[in-house]
Image (tube, coloured by chain):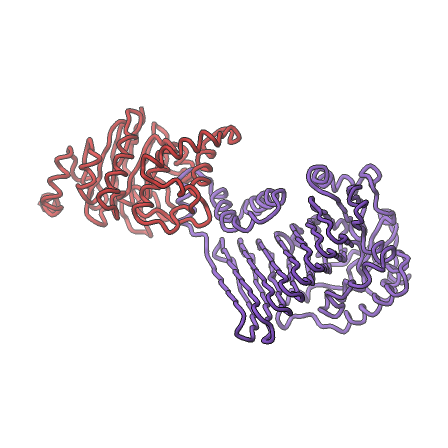
Chain colours: A purple, B red
Amino acid sequence: MIKTNPIEIDREKGNFHYNTDYEFDAGVGLSEDVVRYISDVKSEDNWVKEFRLKALKTFEKKKLPTHWATKDLENIDFDIIRYYLSKGQMPSRTWDEVPDDVKNTFERLGIPEQERKFLAGVEAQFDSEAAYSRMKDDLTEKGVIFVGSTEGLKEYPEIFQKWFGKVIPTSDNKFSALNSAVFSGGSFIYVPPGVKLEQPLQAYFRINAENFGQFERTLIIADEGAEITYMEGCTAPKFETSTLHSAVVELVALKGAKIQYVTVQNWSNNVFNLVTKRAMAHEESEVRWIDCNIGSRLTMKYPGVILRGRKAKGEVLSIALANDGQHQDTGAKMVHTADETTSNVIAKSVSIGEGRSTYRGLVQMPGHLKHCKNNTECDALLINSDSQTDTYPAITVQGEDHSVQHEASVSKVSAEQIFYMQQRGLSEADAMSMCVNGFVNDLIREFPMEYSVELKRLIDLEMEGSVG
Amino acid sequence: MSTLKVQNLSVNIEDKSILNDFSLEIPSGEVHAIMGPNGSGKSTLSKALAAHPSYEVLGGTAKLDGKDLIGLEPDEISRAGLFLAFQYPIEVPGVTIANFIRAAIQARMEDSKAFKAVDYYKDLYKKMDELGIDRKFTARALNDGFSGGEKKRCEILQMAMLDPRFCILDETDSGLDIDALRVVSEGVNSMRSENRGFLVITHYQRLLDYIVPDKVHVMWEGKIVRSGDKELAKELESKGYDWIKEELAA
């Protein structure tokens, strides 16, 4: 059960609370005042404030989706969450200017090192706001914009306002509405026509405070012929109480553009990770979601692509690891709304101990379209006898001109396999890791190299102590 | 010099006694064969020595060069130098032969970073060529979709790469055609040395035409009931096991 933290509660003064660590703190619980507070702290334009307040009403009206999703959602107590915490400074351009406690956190996570090695730009978010944000100078010269949501809406409304909340409407689901009311941080990216980023941009999301909700908002627009790879990583410390992470990520790939969005989520086991991710793919564009979910208590995330331009391509490659006390409810949505569009979904899940993984897939191809293709493969691996998996594919195809393939498999690591591998000298844990790595290997090969190494390491860590 | 010395070994599976006070000593440099009818406990012996979790050792010792293997984990026994070629090699999807053998070699190294990939592949290809295994198999998943003969060759390949001090071959001849049998036997014979011992478990004398044993033991009801030289195997082949049973009953 979630318990309240009495130190942070100060309801008499209208839910606002300051403490020594955070300059700005929206207090505990959700109300119009909290939403106004967040908007005021950010000195937002009126239209943004109105957008938030309207979203709050939508959030309050919408029910939790427990008629199809897990009842665990009911354990989220929206009244005890802190919706905004920040140190009140603009993101620094150098790590030296980042406050020590924050800098040390990211140092330990290896972010500055990765930046030096292989990234074109980094944004590091600590609770509600980015503490650090920097992109290579030549990209700025080419007109690439890489800023936070606040700055994006304030400084570049002509670019971002057009698509903001359009790929994922506020009312899409209860959590997209919540995010729309209280969003803070995230990345707003614009890549001008024809500009191809050779190195990835990366954002790192860190939850630091207990009882805190992180609601970053990301909008990436790749203009005609542009190419970008964006990667995000996430972690949080292990608290006694549950934490909520509820992001909204919108991608817009204009004609001929390519967007690759990579997530390596490694939240601690008390995080509710309820994220809405969707892309709009225009003519001949390509959008690829690479989604790895390793931690969290409950993840619900179904990256989607709306294929609205002729010959657009959408792809979701997804890996989920559900360990004890975890439920990875993940999948993909492919909505075909133009001719000759193709989509590909490959989802692999590993359930360890009492972990549970769920695949939900949605494919829509209406009858008036021609020559659309979808391929879906979902494979589940069960490690222990208590491990669980379930699959809910929803494929709606009309017309006779389309090609759709769906394959699903469930396999189990057997005691005989482990014995066999041990007989060659591998420890039980190494044998198990090898089986799991082997299972996900052909997918991991699709990942950017730096991430595949990290992912393998994370899988090995997860497998420790999972045997027996 | 290596010696496998099994003394007074008693093994149950699901509370049923399979091996009862079993003893056997095999010095290195020798090949011993164990023959016996179905259910006599031959495979139980090999699985128990390798510490398969379904087999419960009630008592006795199994010492490899003085070190008792009983009570060790299967991987510790492997690293101590005991290799078991399986009667039915297990399929491991997703794990390639090259990566698997590499991991097994690295598990034996004090410093796994000292592993030299170039030397490894040179050695691996050489041994694959000798066993008539297509080099493309390095990228194939371990035993996954292999024919019976391919699986057995792969067992011998692993044995050759891991350089064990003592090898148990559990009905390696089952499911092999005559050509595969010859190739596999040549692989085993090339590994015979003063420093390595072999225990060959088989139903049929045929295998022992290729891998000629120094001693042959007959197993029945969990015990060795008769030992002799290679002629004993031929006698069993022509007369069957009934005469031994009759002699024991008498």
Of residues A393 and A22, the one nearer the viewer is A393
Give the quarter of the image for residue A271: bottom right
Can residue A281 be seen by looking at this rendering? yes
Of residues A218 and B132, the one nearer the viewer is B132
Give the quarter of the image for residue B121: top left
Which quadrant is the N terminus of chain A positioned in?
A: bottom right
User: Which residue is drawn at the image coordinates 84% and 43% (left, top)?
Assistant: A92
User: Which residue is drawn at the image coordinates 25% and 37% (left, top)?
Assistant: B185
Of residues A369 and A381, the one nearer the viewer is A369
User: Which residue is drawn at the image coordinates 44% and 50% (left, top)?
Assistant: B93
**With respect to residue A104, does A342 lie above or below?**
below
Please count the marks in the image: 0
Q: Give the left or right position of residue B142, taking residue A128 as reference.
A: left
Q: Give the left or right position of residue B231, taking residue A360 as reference.
A: left
Q: Give the left or right position of residue B138, taking residue A116 as reference.
A: left
Can residue A213 be seen by looking at this rendering? no
Where residue A322 sits: x, y (%)?
A: 57, 55
Where residue B148 sits: x, y (%)?
A: 30, 48
Where residue A68 sits: x, y (%)?
A: 61, 71
Where residue A46 sits: x, y (%)?
A: 90, 64
User: Which residue is drawn at the image coordinates 89% and 56% (left, top)?
Assistant: A41
